[in-house]
Image: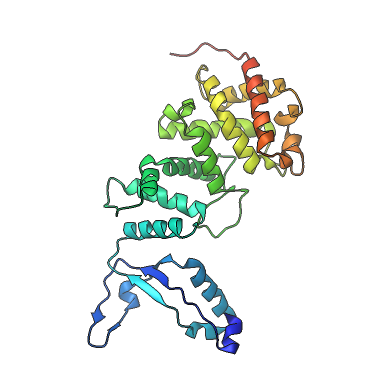
């Protein structure tokens, strides 16, 4: 684009799709429209975000780009909820949108189901919205990432956030929660939403009390999330026979289970296993499955019993 300013051959044939929930008057006598920015405000870019951002970055380096003409389509009187639907349709049928952004839109549409009119959507999108898994999983992630006592505080890279801080993307954590936590065979799923979040937080507190958080650790990356979300199914099946879901109770069970793990991955319950560039850094999906199996075997060997309070 910048080089094109010199050669006069810069060309952007694909239009940008913008939308507003306001009305824009059309003048039929000269086929023009006038846009009062103070009244209309900013437009939502339904499709073409990367092109707009590219032009903005180019204009910062060469102000001549500000005079470059770009074809646009503008939808008017389009409610915010409809704009989200159009964004989702365009970016899931034409090309993939960033998965974390897609999850957030699914969440907002799920929450709007009973209070707003939603336009007709493709069946696969409607089914996802109706099921509401993205909404449920994102509530887990938001809770873990924002609770002051959480070992995950500010460690998750959220979609649409400018900060690059964090050790794992929102989309990966959400995917693991949907796959292993929000499933029928995980007993935590029958609890109220608020209790689910607190129990899951206690689970991670127990894990980090044992494995630590101070050293540069892979525990807060994909391998740690995938393994311990997967292990949560047998672990919480064990917990339903316990008197409570306190951190201390979970920690005692985990410590006993870690001590019983045998084989090549017996060190999974030790901090050194999870430090950066150590064993956990080089695990693939097959190895994670093996470790999970060994941890389940070890869990069954534990004999942690208390009188259950009624």
246 up-or-down from 119: above or below: above
The residue lying at 45 percent from left, 28 percent from top is: 184
249 up-or-down from 182: above or below: above
**Residue 216 seen in this snapshot:** yes
Pinpoint residue 45: horizontal percent, then vertical percent.
42, 67
Front-lying residue, 284 or 249 = 284
Q: Is residue 74 left or right of residue 176?
A: left
The residue lying at 74 percent from left, 29 percent from top is: 265
Looking at the rendered image, the quarter that the C terminus falls into is top left
Q: Residue furthest top?
A: 307
Pinpoint residue 238: horizontal percent, then vertical percent.
55, 20
Pinpoint residue 145: horizontal percent, then vertical percent.
53, 45
Number of numbered tags placed on the structure image:
0
140 up-or-down from 157: above or below: above
Front-lying residue, 53 or 71 = 71
**Residue 147 seen in this snapshot:** no
The residue lying at 66 percent from left, 20 percent from top is: 298
């Amino acid at each position: 684009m910048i080089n094109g300013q010199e050669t006069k051959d810069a060309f952007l044939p694909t239009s940008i799709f913008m939308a507003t929930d306001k009305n824009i008057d059309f003048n039929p006598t000269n086929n023009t429209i006038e846009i009062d920015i103070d009244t209309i405000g900013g437009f939502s870019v339904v499709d073409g975000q990367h092109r707009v951002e590219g032009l903005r970055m180019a204009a910062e380096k060469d102000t001549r780009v500000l005079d470059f003409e770009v074809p646009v389509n503008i939808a008017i009187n389009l409610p915010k909820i409809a704009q989200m639907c159009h964004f989702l349709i365009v970016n899931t049928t034409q090309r993939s949108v960033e998965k974390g952004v897609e999850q957030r839109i699914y969440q907002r549409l799920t929450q709007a189901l009973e209070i707003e009119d939603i336009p007709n959507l493709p069946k696969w999108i409607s089914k996802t919205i109706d099921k509401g898994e993205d909404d449920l999983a994102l509530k887990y992630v938001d809770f873990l990432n924002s609770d002051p006592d959480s070992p995950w505080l500010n460690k998750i890279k959220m979609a649409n956030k400018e900060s690059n801080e964090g050790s794992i993307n929102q989309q990966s954590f959400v995917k693991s929660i949907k796959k292993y936590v929000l499933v029928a065979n995980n007993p935590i799923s029958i609890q109220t939403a608020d209790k689910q979040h607190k129990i899951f937080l206690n689970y991670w507190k127990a894990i980090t009390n044992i494995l630590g958080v101070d050293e540069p650790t892979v525990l807060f990356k994909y391998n740690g999330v995938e393994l311990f979300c997967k292990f949560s199914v047998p672990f919480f099946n064990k917990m339903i026979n316990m008197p409570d879901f306190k951190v201390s109770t979970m920690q005692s069970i985990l410590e006993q289970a870690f001590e019983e793990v045998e084989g090549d991955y017996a060190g999974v319950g030790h901090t050194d296993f999870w430090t950066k560039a150590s064993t956990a850094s080089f695990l693939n999906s097959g190895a994670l499955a093996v470790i999970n199996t060994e941890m389940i075997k070890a869990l069954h060997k534990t004999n942690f019993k208390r009188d259950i309070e009624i």
